[in-house]
Image: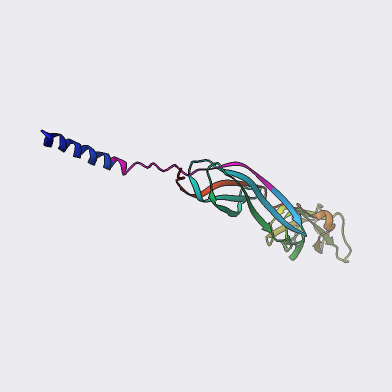
Amino acid sequence: MNKIWFLPLIFLIMLSGCSLRNFSLLPRASLLILSDHLEKTVVDDEFTAEITGVARNNSSAKLEYAEVIGEFYDKDGTLLYSGVNSTTNLDPGQIWEFTISYSESPPEPAYPSLRILGCVFVKNVPIEAKLEGSAQNDGNVTLTFVKLTGHFLGYTGAELTPTGTATTTDLQVGETWNFTIYFPRHNVDLPYDGYVKIENPDEDLQWAEAAEEVDHATVQVGALRGSTVMP
């Protein structure tokens, strides 16, 4: 009779052992970010962005290792830099103050410039007289507005009036612009030659001030490694 009860008991022990293999009594490691803030400063022409924050061991496990990941973005959402700050031996409920920094080299001074690559005078009597050419943004900033003024010359070399203009916008650094400037008169037989130039550089070459590159940042919990806390 005792043997009959002994076999079910062995079976229950084996069944319990199989179940415990998939069950852990270890507390789950957890880190909670309580707050974070982005600060931007300029010292000696060097721009620095810094994420400062506070996190807490939000579990009953001791965190032998914990990290937070900070990511810095520009205004278009492009990731500029990703940094990590870590700590060790963080007890349950313990507060951790973290910092993640990103520094930028001093920006190159803005240099708006347009270079005339070439210009030719074309006359098709009695249809049109025009100046055709190309120009390149050889500065270091995007030109948000560009205007060229075409000057037309008569047979004697004297300048004719009125002049003509051509404009474009958002000319990227290194980009080439092919322009055409028409002589704005009905008598297209008058011009004999011509040339183009930037009439008023301060007005004809407009560019936008570069904003601070870092616009916003995010922070998230990275890798965690915890252990039980013995009573």
Q: Is residue 211 visible?
A: no
Residue 74, percent from left and from top: 65, 50
Query: Which residue is more in the foreground, 72 or 187?
Result: 72
> Is residue 106 in the magenta section?
no
Q: Which colour scheme is used?
A: rainbow
**In the visual, does 20 lie left or right of 9?**
right
| Residue at 12% in and 37% down | 3
Displayed quadrant of residue 103: bottom right
Residue 173, percent from left and from top: 69, 60
Residue 132, percent from left and from top: 73, 61
Q: Which stretch appears magenta?
A: 19-38
Q: How many labels does the image show?
A: 0
**In the visual, does 83 lie left or right of 152?**
left
Query: Which residue is more in the foreground, 36 or 56?
Result: 56
Query: Which residue is more in the foreground, 24 or 188?
Result: 24
Residue 60, percent from left and from top: 48, 41
> Is residue 37 in the magenta section?
yes
- Which quarter of the rendering shows the N terminus? top left
Q: Is residue 89 visible?
A: yes
Q: Is residue 95 above or below residue 103?
A: above
| Residue at 87% in and 59% down | 160
Q: In this view, does 26 lie above or below 114?
A: above
Instruction: Name the residue at the left extreme.
Output: 1
Query: Which residue is more in the foreground, 184 or 30?
Result: 30
Displayed quadrant of residue 82: bottom right
